[in-house]
Image (cartoon, grey):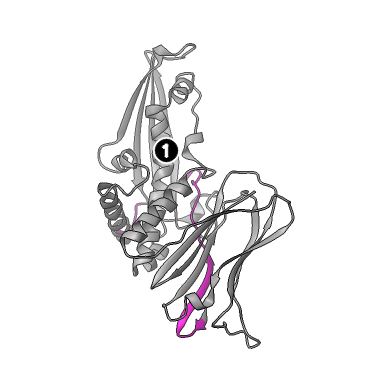
């Protein structure tokens, strides 16, 4: 951490998690984990009531209650169906944080949603799918963020992100005829969980933007497309140091989804010969173009206690 005119400047990666894989031996959440979840979830519910969530999470939230989500699909309307009906039941349980339980968790992740255990049965032409899904949140990281307004917005964005991994597949179960036809043929399609984050980051970013504005933060949002020459380097100017002098702590953060075509991301802040941060000069973000194997956008934030700038950076 560097001292900057009485303000702290921290440069870090923003660890937004991916969907986890199979979680073995889940443990009950601690009292602190339950309290943190309930506090953040209550704010999400209020955001929903104010209609600032860009995509509803009603059904997955319901699955966290004592009443599971249920859906019955009539398979007789589809040709080559293997059964007459498919009945789906989904429960989501908050479990204790343990990053060692899933090899698919990214290092430094703050949370995960897992489509985990599924009991399958077929009787008299009716196929039954009973899911027990798991949600876990990193209490150490969330606890620290709950101490300030923007940290609370980050926590809300994180929980919204994780619950969308559940809601988007539930949406397909309810509305997508192609998905319903597949499950009637014994082909369960997990694609809607959005493992590659084709839509979740946009939903999360939009929600965080609206939540920040509501709390009085100032935002500037722009999307930048990089050139497509693989192996080439790029840099963009985010702003000038002078814009942030005297405005409280400064934090630079970024998140890069795996395989989205951008690597070696770093921030560059102007310094003098003694390595002290200058009072003027450009703040830059730099990186390298790599072959793209997945859809995705990387995001960077320039945050300060008197305001907030945030942008997303698209891969080639």
Q: Main SS of the magenta segment?
A: loop
Image location (x, y in percent) of residue 276? 58, 85
Specify whether residue 204 is in view.
yes
x 39%, y 34%: residue: 170
Q: Nearer the viewer, residue 161 or 28?
A: 161
Of residues 117 and 10, which is closer to you in this image?
10
Q: Which residue, given by chain and number where applicable, does mark 1 sit on? A: 168
For label 1, the crowd category at 10 Å Cα-Cα, with few meaning under 14, some 14 to 19 and many 20 or more, is: many
| Residue under the image location 37 percent in, 50 percent down | 95
Q: Is residue 104 above or below residue 39?
A: above
Residue 19 locus on image (x, y percent): 49, 46
Picture quadrant of residue 313: bottom right
Q: Nearer the viewer, residue 278 or 249?
A: 278
Residue 68 position within the rendered picture, expressed as x and y whole percent measured from the top left: 29, 36
* Residue that extends furthest to the bottom in the rendered view of this protein: 274
Q: Where 175 falls versus 224 (above or below)?
A: above
User: Which contiguous range is marked in magenta?
Assistant: 3-31
Left or right position of 11 against 149: right
Quarter residue 184 falls in: top left
Eyeballing the image, is 197 above or below 274?
above
Q: Is residue 161 left or right of residue 298?
A: left
Q: Residue at x 44, y 14 (%)?
A: 78
Quadrant housing residue 69: top left
Disc 1 is placed on an element classified as helix
Is residue 57 rendered magenta in the image? no
Residue 26 in view: no
Residue 25 belongs to magenta span:
yes
């Amino acid at each position: 951490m560097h001292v900057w005119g009485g303000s702290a400047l921290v440069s870090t990666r923003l660890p937004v998690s991916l969907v986890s894989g199979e979680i073995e031996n889940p443990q009950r959440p601690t009292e602190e984990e339950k309290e943190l979840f309930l506090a953040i979830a209550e704010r999400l519910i209020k955001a929903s009531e104010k209609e600032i969530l860009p995509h509803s999470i009603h059904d997955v939230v319901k699955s966290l209650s004592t009443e599971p989500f249920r859906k019955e699909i009539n398979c007789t309307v589809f040709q080559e169906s293997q059964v007459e009906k498919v009945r789906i039941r989904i429960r989501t349980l908050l479990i204790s944080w343990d990053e060692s339980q899933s090899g698919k968790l990214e290092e430094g992740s703050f949370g995960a949603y897992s489509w985990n255990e599924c009991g399958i049965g077929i009787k008299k032409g009716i196929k039954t799918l009973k899911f027990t899904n798991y949600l876990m949140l990193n209490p150490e990281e969330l606890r620290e963020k709950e101490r300030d307004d923007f940290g609370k917005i980050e926590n809300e964005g994180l929980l919204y992100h994780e619950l969308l991994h559940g809601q988007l597949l539930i949406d397909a179960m309810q509305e997508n005829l192609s998905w319903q036809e597949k499950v009637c043929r014994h082909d369960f399609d997990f694609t809607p969980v959005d493992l590659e984050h084709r839509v979740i980051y946009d939903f999360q970013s939009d929600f965080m933007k609206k939540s920040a504005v509501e709390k009085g933060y100032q935002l500037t949002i722009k999307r930048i497309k990089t050139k497509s020459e693989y192996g080439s380097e790029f840099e963009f100017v985010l702003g000038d140091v002078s814009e942030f002098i005297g405005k409280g702590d400064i934090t630079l953060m970024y998140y890069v989804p795996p395989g989205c075509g951008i690597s070696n991301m770093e921030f560059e802040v102007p310094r003098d010969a003694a390595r002290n941060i200058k009072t003027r000069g450009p703040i830059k973000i730099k990186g390298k173009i790599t072959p793209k194997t997945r859809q995705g956008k990387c995001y960077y934030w320039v945050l300060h206690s008197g305001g907030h700038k945030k942008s997303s950076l698209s891969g080639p």
